Amino acid sequence: MAKRMKYKIESKHPDCGEAIDRQLHNIALWCADEALNSGVMTDSRSFIALRVKRNWLDGKSTDRELNHAVRNAKDARYFRDSKARDAASVAYEAAKPELTPTRVRKIINRARMYTNWSISRDEMKEQLSIMGRPELLA
């Protein structure tokens, strides 16, 4: 069963004061965590990028630190093993500072289809409904 989490819908980013949809970021991070923890990923750069992204959302990391972590996560995508490559790609996309509902849908679908993440469509639908974003499941 999927982990249930609570999310703030929207807040202001501490560095720039712009409204960010934390929910979209947290859903993308959740999917990336599940993809990376499916047992295929060993490169720490993807895990670090997600940690920096969480810190950035909380105002504990700067834009510069996030951009550096995203660049490192991009480099972590080059694996021979396709499952590890796909998990790293999901993490790279989730770590980016700009997220749209369309991009999050792609992250969700890629995490479900191309990694060892064993979550059924019904479980995903339930989780996204709990988060108040059922429309993200394409």
Image: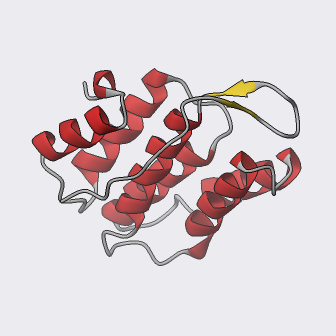
Q: Position of residue 1 (x, y in %)?
A: 18, 60
Residue 73 can be seen, yes or no:
yes
> Is any part of residue 75 visible from this angle?
no
Locate residue 113, reporting x and y percent.
23, 46
Q: Nearer the viewer, residue 2 or 78?
A: 2
In what quadrant of the picture does the C terminus appear?
A: top left
Left or right: 94 as drawn, with respect to 105: right
Question: Quick check: 8 left or right of 97?
Answer: left
Front residue (pair 54, 74) = 54
Left or right placement of residue 136 versus residue 71 in this view: left
Residue 110 in which image quadrant: top left
Residue 96 picture quarter: top right
From the viewer's perspective, tell me whether residue 47 is left or right of residue 56.
Answer: left
- Please name the residue shown 61% across and 48% down the image: 95
| Residue 11 lies in quadrant | top right
Question: Quick check: 3 above or below 104?
Answer: below
Looking at the image, is 64 positioned above or below residue 135?
Answer: below
Query: Residue drawn at (67%, 52%), measured in percent from left and top?
Result: 53
Residue pictured at 24% horizontal, 56% vertical: 2
* Residue 12, position as x, y percentages in the image: 75, 31
Kindly identify the residue that appears in the image at 36 percent across and 60 percent down.
34
**Percent x, y for residue 18?**
79, 25
